[in-house]
Image (tube, rainbow, N blue to C red):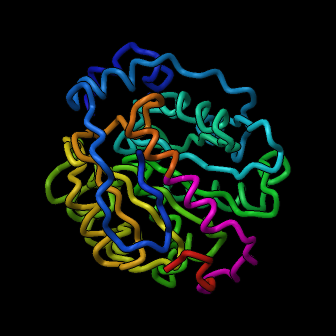
Amino acid sequence: MSDALLGGGPHRAAPAARPAVSAAAPPTAAAPPTAAACGPAEEERRALGRPPAEPPRTLRYGGHPDQVCDLWRAADPDAPTVLLLHGGFWKQQYDRRHLSPLAAHLAASGFHAVLAEYRRVGGAGGWPGTLDDTAALVDAAASGTLAADVPSSGRAPLLLGHSAGGHLALWAAARHLLPSDAPWRGGRRPRGVLAVAPVADLAAAVADGSGGGAAAAFLGGADRVAERLPYADPAALGPTGVPTVVVHGEDDPDVPVARSRAYAAADPAVRMLPLPGVGHFAPVDPGTAACGVLLDALRALDAATAAPAAPPADGAPEAPEEGGR
C-alpha cells in the first residue's frame, strides 16, 4: 500500500459464474479466475482514487474523534448488518473513507453497512487503543451503545475486515481465546467473519517488516513484540468457533496470500477463497469481478449463520453456530 497514492487525496485521513460459498465447506477452494484488467498498482490507484461515498448517518461509540462509525441502511429493515473494519496497516494516515464506496455498495446489495473508524498508529491508537476500539465496536454493535441505531433483526452483526482490518476482524473472533489476563477477553462475538487479504499472521508480518515495520509499530515497538504477540496474533490463538471465510488475491503485493492459506490450513472449517490474477484492493472495489466474489461470499456466510445465537458469558466459549468450526 503506497502512502504516495493517498497524499492530498480524498482518502488520506483528515489533517485515509462465481462459486457458492459455505462456511462449512472444505478449507480451500479456488475461485474461478477473476483476472483484473490491470495490475496490483493500478488496482490500488483505482480503489483509493474513488470519491468517498457520503454516509447518511454517523454514530459515535466513544469520546475520541476517531471513535465513530458511518451507517448505510439497506432498503429492507430486516436486512443483515455488516460491521466493516478498514485497512492501512493500522496507520493514522489511512482512514475509513476508502471503504465507503464498498459500504454504500453493500447497502444497495441488501446489507445494513456500518463502516467503523478506530484509533490508529501515529494518532491515539496502536497498542492498546486500536484493540480497545475493536472490542468496543463489536460489543456496541451487538448489544451496547450502537444497538439502538444499528439494525439487527435479532442477529449479531457479521464482521468484514480488509488487510489490517482483516487482522482486527480475526482477532475479534478470537477474544475468548486470549490469555486470561487480557483486558479484551470475552465480550460479544461476531456471528461470522469475512477477512479480505488479512494480516492473519502478525509474527510473520513483524519478521518481514510488512508496511515499513507496521506490525512492530502497532505492537508498540520491537522491544515489546515478544510479550504482546500472544495477545494480538490471530494465527497464534487457534480455532475460534466463529464461521470464517478468507478472500485473498493471489497477486497481492502487500500481504502474501500464503499467510491466509496457512491460517485456513490450521483449521479445516475456515473457508479459503484465493482469487487468481487479483491483487490487494480489487475485492473491496465495487464493480470488479473480485468484489462480486466477496459479495457472494458474504451472502453465503449470512445464510449459513442466520439463526440467532445467545450471547456467551464473558470469557466463556460459545457453542459453534451453524456452519461454524
Which residue is drawn at the image coordinates 47% and 50% (left, top)? 161
Q: Is residue 200 something one can see in this rendering?
A: yes
Residue at figure coordinates x 52%, y 68% from the top left: 173
Q: Nearer the viewer, residue 194 or 135?
A: 194
Question: Is residue 292 shown left or right of residue 80?
Answer: left
Residue 54 located left or right of residue 165: right
Q: Position of residue 14 (x, y in %)?
A: 50, 22
Magenta segment? 297-317
Note whether 60 is above or below 325 in the view shown: above
Please state the horizontal and vertical placement of residue 108, each as a whole percent of the image.
Answer: 66, 33
Q: Quadrant of residue 28?
A: bottom left
The picture places residue 128, in percent across and down from the top left corner, at: 47, 58
Left or right relative to 119: residue 279: left
Any part of residue 220 in sight: no
* Tally of marks: 0
Give the overall secondary structure of the magenta segment: loop
Q: Residue at x 38, y 13 (%)?
A: 8
Q: Quadrant of the N terminus?
A: top left
Q: Residue furthest front?
A: 17
- Position of residue 151 measured from the top left corner of the image (x, y, whole percent): 79, 49
Q: Is residue 309 rendered magenta in the image?
A: yes
Q: Is residue 131 magenta?
A: no
Give the image quarter of residue 2. Answer: top left
* Residue at figure coordinates x 63%, y 38% from the top left: 109
